[in-house]
Amino acid sequence: MSIKLNEAIFNKFPEIESKRLLFRQLRKDDASYILSIRTDKKVSRYIDTVAPQTIKDSEKRISRIQTTFNEQKGITWAIVDKITNTLIGDFGIWRLDKDNSRGEIGYVLDPRYWGKGYMKETITTLVHYAFNDLNLHSLEANVNPDNKNSKQLLLNVGFKQEAYFRENYLFDGRFLDSEIYCLLKSDIA
């Protein structure tokens, strides 16, 4: 069986909508929102990467995201509340493995929007896009084991835990554990 990634989606950034949200390309003027969200202690405690320190750091992140899209290695959307036109987070499909039609997802959401179904709406919308438009076979999520809300969210939308890796990731001078979750296209068909 051969499954080919739909590379045509990289010709123009795909803007997508759900009931309450708009998913669009991140822009340089989003840098202050990105900085605010990613430096919030409630968010950063589960992101095992160095948090941006300045707007310039966030601009560099946005530039890397745009390069990743241009190189057809991933897609990251800004999550925008349609009513207020406010950026409330981001969602990406990255580490695209074209040979195996698999990608890894990652996401952050402004804590003021937690518990209101925004991330479930995001994941549901963009997972369908990944399977039906991008033509991926599977998605994975690498989760900090302490992030109970993220794990529950993934389980609620159909992801299954695939693995628990002990001390497989070095961050900030410490080895950390990782939990891997997976969703197959056939799981939601």
Image (cartoon, rainbow, N blue to C red):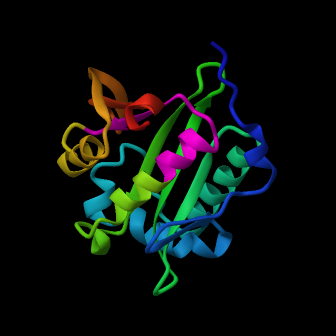
Q: Is residue 66 magenta?
A: no
Say whether residue 161 is left or right of residue 139.
left
Locate residue 144 relative to residue 86 in the image: left or right: left
Residue found at the very far front of the displayed protein: 189
Measuring from the top left, give residue 89's x and y in whole percent. 44, 65
Of residues 112 and 132, the one nearer the viewer is 132
Residue positioned 47% across, 32% down in the render: 185
Task: Say which quadrant the C terminus sits in.
Answer: top left
Q: How many marks?
A: 0
In the image, 166 versus 122, the foreground residue is 122
Residue 126 vs 110, above or below: the answer is: above
Residue at the image position 72 percent from the left and 57 percent from the top:
13
The residue lying toward the viewer, choosing from 46 and 52, is 46
Q: Tell me where residue 31 sits by quadrant.
A: bottom right
Please identify the residue farthest to the right as the structure is shown: 11
User: Which span is picked out in magenta?
Assistant: 126-144
Q: Is residue 179 visible?
A: no
Q: Position of residue 68 (x, y in %)?
A: 69, 44
Residue 127 part of the magenta-drawn span: yes
* Residue 136, horizontal then vertical, whole percent: 57, 33
